[in-house]
Image (cartoon, grey):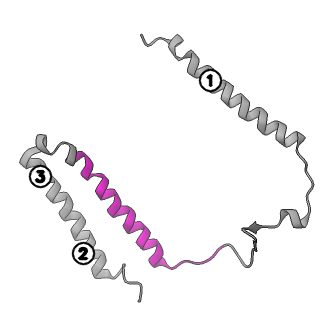
Amino acid sequence: MNTTSSYFPIVMQTLVAGGFVGLVLTLTHLLGPSRKNKTKDANFECGVESDGDARVRFSIKYFMTAILFVLFDVEVIFFYPYAVNFKELGGEGFLAVLMFVSFFLIGFFYVLKKGALEWDK
């Protein structure tokens, strides 16, 4: 049932779509207006003129909070397979999940002790 000819429509659709995108990009570049001046090339955002440098310094606390959010958010993702298979995993699976949660709780308490979530410092 899985022969090379069964993939022919997918390959053709991919080629046609890619060809269309390439053709449209080429035509808009060739046929579109290309008047450039200082006012047209200036940055413009929602009616407010840009002021200053785009490279604004952020506090390291912002990045620490983001990294910690990702870390603890990924922890929740790993609970899904356990929740689906908790009957089949039995007591051994429950102990494995308890160990998994304990590692993250140790990490969370370490982060709290170090003050990474305190914004006032």
Residue closest to the far left:
91
| Magenta range | 55-82
Q: Position of residue 4 (x, y in %)?
A: 51, 12
Identify the image quadrant of residue 67.
bottom left
Residue 73: mark: none
- Cα–Cα gap, marks 2 and 1: 53 Å
Query: Please, what secondary structure does the residue beneath circle 1 have?
Result: helix
At a point 81% along the width and 37% down the height, the residue shown is 26
> Does residue 21 appear left or right of residue 70 in this picture?
right
Identify the image quadrant of residue 55.
bottom right
Query: Please, what secondary structure does the residue beneath circle 3 have?
Result: helix
**Which residue is identified by label 1?**
13
Image quarter of the C terminus: bottom left
**Which residue is identified by label 2?**
109
- Cα–Cα gap, marks 2 and 3: 22 Å
Report the mark closest to the observer, 2 or 3. 3
**Which residue is identified by label 3?**
94
